[in-house]
Image (cartoon, rainbow, N blue to C red):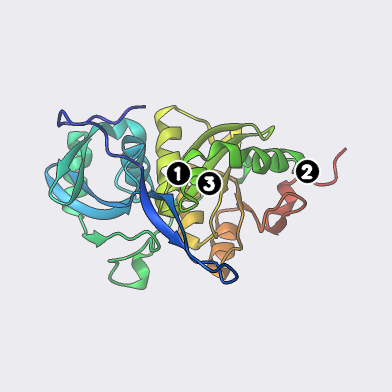
Amino acid sequence: MADGMRTGRSRPETAVRVATRVVAYAAPEPRDGERALAVEMPVNLVYGSVPYAVMMATPADLEDFAYGFSLTEGIVASADEIRGAAVERGEGGLRLLVDLAPGRLREHLARKRAISGRTGCGVCGIEDLAALPRAEMRDASTAVSVRPEAIARALSDLGDAQALGRETRAVHAAAWAGLDGSLVAVREDVGRHNALDKLIGALIRAGTDPAEGFLVITSRCSFEMVEKAAHFGASVLVAISAPTSLAIDRARLHRMTLCAIARADSFTVFCGDERLDAWVA
């Protein structure tokens, strides 16, 4: 899914190479070299010509990002409320122009809030605790079961699927795996929230059924990541790093299976273990 660029210029790079000097404690002299770095730049999301948020992001899969961010922020309820998205260069960054359906745009502008987005914060700009995001409750009957070997397969394949991650060692990834563990889609970004938004955007644009698989993220699992997963409708979330206490509380609230500290040899189930076929032959 290519991003629409309104300028005639080439698409922004996602990695740049810089000169380095490596100092080893045991070596007599520094070693000159070169290293790839992940590109991070401001992306201003704009709805109906009105700026909404500036997110620090990797300039790739931005159309997916527009869809996923709009869904998980509660700006839209479904992909068909977005008529399109385009990217244009602005001073010091990119502008992501999201074209909402007229009725949805009016509703959005009536309740617009401004936030300042960062790679490590998902709720900047809210004014009180009551404004913390919360996805709608999912019908528990729609939950899926996942076998441990499917999770192991997804984790095993995820490294090879992270092209930018292998090159830079500086980005997060979010993946959607089928119930057999095969990877269906992977998105990367310097921000863990952005990576998940990009993935969710790709999934809703493709009409993916949340009952057809599970989510895998390479970052720690905070409550925002659980809420984004719940907005999409996922019932199983697997994280490579540990969850926070509030993430577990929210996962229980959404009747979600939360697995974390997922490694090649094991994973830990923090809630929802009744939906794991852990002991079925």
Camera-nearest label, 3 or 2: 2
Q: Farthest front residue?
A: 28
SS at circle 1: strand
Camera-nearest label, 1 or 2: 1
Q: From what the image shows, is residue 264 above or below residue 101? A: below
Structural crowding at the residue carrying mark 2, measured as other residues with C-alpha within 10 Å and reported as few (<14), some (14–19) or many (≥20): few
Camera-nearest label, 1 or 3: 1
Residue at image point 76% right, 53% down: 266
The amino acid marked with disc number 1 is: Glu
Which residue does the numbered mark 3 point to in the structure image?
Answer: 138
Residue at image point 37% right, 72% down: 129
Residue at image point 31% right, 65% down: 124
Which mark is first along the chain, 3 or 1? 3
SS at circle 3: loop
Name the image quarter holding residue 78: top left
Measure the C-alpha gap from mark 1 to mark 2: 29 Å
Which residue does the numbered mark 1 point to in the structure image?
Answer: 188
Residue at image point 27% right, 51% down: 41
**In the image, 7: left or right of 218?**
left
Quarter of the rendering occupied by the C terminus:
top right
Image location (x, y in percent) of residue 140:
61, 46
Which mark is first along the chain, 2 or 3? 3
Q: Are marks 3 and 2 in contact (CB under 8 Å)?
A: no
> Quick check: can you spot residue 144?
no
110 and 260: which is toward the camera: 260
Q: Which disc number belongs to residue 278?
A: none
Q: Which disc number belongs to residue 277?
A: 2
The amino acid marked with disc number 3 is: Arg
